[in-house]
Image: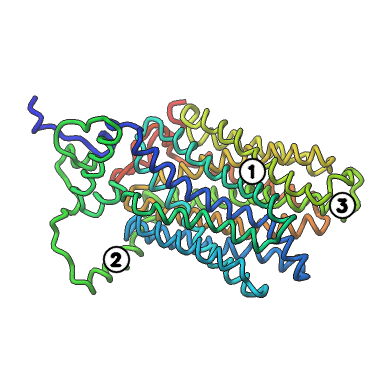
């Protein structure tokens, strides 16, 4: 058959070029974006208690320092998703990084509690864009082993949390929280230096009618990976391959600037409302519950690590040894429980492409609940750390798979908007969990706090069962018409 009659889709092109040097570079860039976000989130475990002590804050004021960051992330997750789907992944990278690095550094010079609150809120807006890095990297990965490579990508988050714990251990006893905030902002500036090397997503380019530019990215990938694209003409979707249908041509005349701006704004609202179309509404609502539950439980476990020992001491527990409450114990506990994410990620990497997304999340969430349950009875310091280690190991594993699952469910046209809104709902869970972890635990209501975590995890697990689609091994859809809500639920298990 003559090569001129052949065509290949974007997913077929990605499969042909394989995973090589090109994706490794993208992995390092996008992964470093998640590394910096993890560092900023882990700061919450150290800055709150330190600022409370220095400025004589109440427990409510300490909790608010954490809550405003998640409030900023709530706004940022939604906003950056819209910006990314309408203006490009690369442009959103620049804005996200500038916001995170600049405001993060300014936070170190806060003269008062009120200014620190405002700056941490704005920094949270920048942190809300972390999901854009994930979706961008996802769009370059062949479908066959996408789960494994996305879990590897997620290890950057764990490395960031461990690095921040080590940094806090070195900085806080010798200097103060201002130095920790300032030093933690430096990696975001490093990310800016390599911004020019990040290519635009070929899926996004084709969706916007820039077929030639999308094909050029594929050619660069093939060249750097020392592979070849399939013979024939590049098309984006199966529909175009079979029926000759196409997305808008790159030669469509440009709109006048005013109309173009209005069109982009209208497109932004359209992409949001598309999440509630008949094909996507059940997916959207279930993802909201999924991310709320995961964020509530994951960040709750992190905050429990720093709050539990002090609360047990204040509430008269006799199970804790005095040396466990010495100044360095907090950093040791946070470091140990952060390291717990490594086996959690290894576990998810092993099962995500074998069991599928849904079953992997369900198994690890259930294990997380089992590890938390004994804390209701009160445990020794060592046992408390061991149980939190296991709970965080399983929680991060399940949360990581959820972060992979969400963008896989949406077509390219609304991928970052959909996953962004889901992440925004997760931030609401992050905003509410300090009320439980700090408020209930320090108020000597440990049993109530643990039971609430168990209920949230149970609801999240039930939500997983209700998803109609298993995305293991499936190609990413480009348009809403390609989305298949009737796909095999359990991926053939």
- In which quarter of the view is residue 319 placed? top right
197 relative to 231, above or below: below
**Residue tagged by mark 2?**
264
From the top left corner, tell me how far across and down residue 389 is, in percent. 70, 39
**Residue at image point 76% right, 67% down:** 54
Q: Secondary structure at mark 1?
A: helix
**Residue tagged by mark 3?**
313
Total numbered labels = 3
165 relative to 46, above or below: above
- In which quarter of the view is residue 251 placed? bottom left
Q: Nearer the viewer, residue 490 or 68?
A: 68
From the top left corner, tell me how far across and down residue 190 is, in percent. 47, 54
From the top left corner, tell me how far across and down residue 158 is, in percent. 58, 43
The quadrant of the image that shows the N terminus is: top left
Mark 3 packing: few (<14 Cα in 10 Å), some, or many (20+)? some
**Real-space Cα separation, disc 3 to disc 2, in angstroms:** 56 Å
**Real-space Cα separation, disc 1 to disc 3, in angstroms:** 30 Å
From the top left corner, tell me how far across and down residue 149 is, in percent. 44, 35
Q: Secondary structure at mark 3?
A: helix
Looking at the rendered image, the disc whose residue lies closer to the viewer, 2 or 1, is 2
Tell me if label 3 and label 2 are in contact, CB under 8 Å. Answer: no
Q: Earlier in the sequence, mark 3 or mark 2?
A: 2
Q: Earlier in the sequence, mark 2 or mark 1?
A: 2
Q: Nearer the viewer, residue 155 or 277?
A: 155
**Residue at image point 80% right, 37% down:** 383
395 relative to 168, above or below: above
């Amino acid at each position: 058959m003559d090569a001129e009659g052949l065509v290949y889709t974007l997913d077929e092109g990605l499969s042909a070029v394989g995973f090589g040097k090109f994706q490794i570079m993208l992995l390092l860039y996008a992964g470093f974006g998640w590394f910096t976000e993890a560092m900023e989130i882990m700061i919450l475990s150290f800055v709150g208690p330190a600022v409370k002590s220095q400025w004589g804050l109440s427990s409510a004021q300490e909790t608010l320092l954490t809550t405003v960051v998640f409030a900023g992330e709530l706004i940022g997750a939604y906003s950056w998703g819209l910006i990314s789907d309408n203006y490009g992944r690369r442009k959103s990278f620049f804005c996200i990084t500038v916001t995170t690095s600049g405001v993060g550094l300014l936070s170190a010079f806060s003269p008062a509690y009120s200014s620190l609150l405002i700056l941490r809120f704005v920094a949270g807006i920048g942190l809300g864009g972390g999901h854009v890095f994930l979706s961008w990297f996802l769009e370059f990965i062949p479908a066959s082993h996408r789960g494994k490579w996305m879990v590897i990508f997620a290890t950057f988050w764990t490395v960031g949390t461990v690095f921040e714990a080590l940094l806090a251990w070195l900085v806080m006893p010798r200097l103060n929280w201002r130095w920790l905030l300032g030093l933690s902002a430096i990696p975001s500036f490093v990310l800016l230096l390599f911004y020019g090397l990040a290519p635009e997503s070929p899926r996004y380019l084709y969706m916007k009618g820039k077929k030639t530019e999308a094909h050029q990215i594929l050619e660069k990938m093939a060249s750097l990976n020392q592979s070849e694209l399939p013979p024939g003409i590049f098309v984006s979707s199966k529909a175009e391959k079979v029926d000759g249908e196409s997305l808008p041509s790159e030669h469509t005349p440009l709109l006048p600037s005013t109309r173009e701006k209005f069109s982009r704004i209208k497109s932004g609202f359209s992409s949001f409302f598309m999440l509630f179309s008949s094909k996507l509404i059940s997916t959207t609502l279930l993802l909201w519950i999924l991310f709320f539950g995961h964020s509530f439980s994951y960040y709750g476990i992190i905050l429990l690590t720093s709050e539990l020992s002090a609360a047990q001491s204040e509430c008269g527990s006799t199970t804790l040894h005095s040396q466990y409450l010495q100044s360095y114990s907090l950093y040791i506990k946070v470091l140990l429980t952060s390291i717990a994410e490594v086996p959690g990620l290894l576990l998810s990497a092993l099962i995500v492409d074998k069991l599928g997304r849904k079953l992997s999340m369900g198994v690890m969430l259930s294990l997380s609940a089992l590890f938390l349950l004994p804390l209701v009875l009160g445990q020794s310091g060592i046992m408390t750390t061991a149980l939190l280690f296991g709970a965080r190991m399983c929680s991060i594993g399940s949360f990581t798979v959820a972060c992979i699952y969400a963008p896989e469910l949406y077509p390219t046209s609304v991928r970052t908007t959909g996953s962004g809104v889901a992440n925004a709902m997760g931030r609401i869970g992050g905003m509410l969990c300090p009320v439980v972890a700090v408020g209930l635990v320090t108020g000597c209501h440990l049993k109530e706090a643990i039971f609430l975590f168990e209920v949230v995890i149970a609801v999240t697990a039930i939500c997983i069962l209700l998803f109609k689609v298993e995305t293991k091994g499936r190609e990413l859809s480009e348009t809403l018409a390609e989305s298949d809500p009737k796909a095999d639920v359990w991926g053939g298990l």
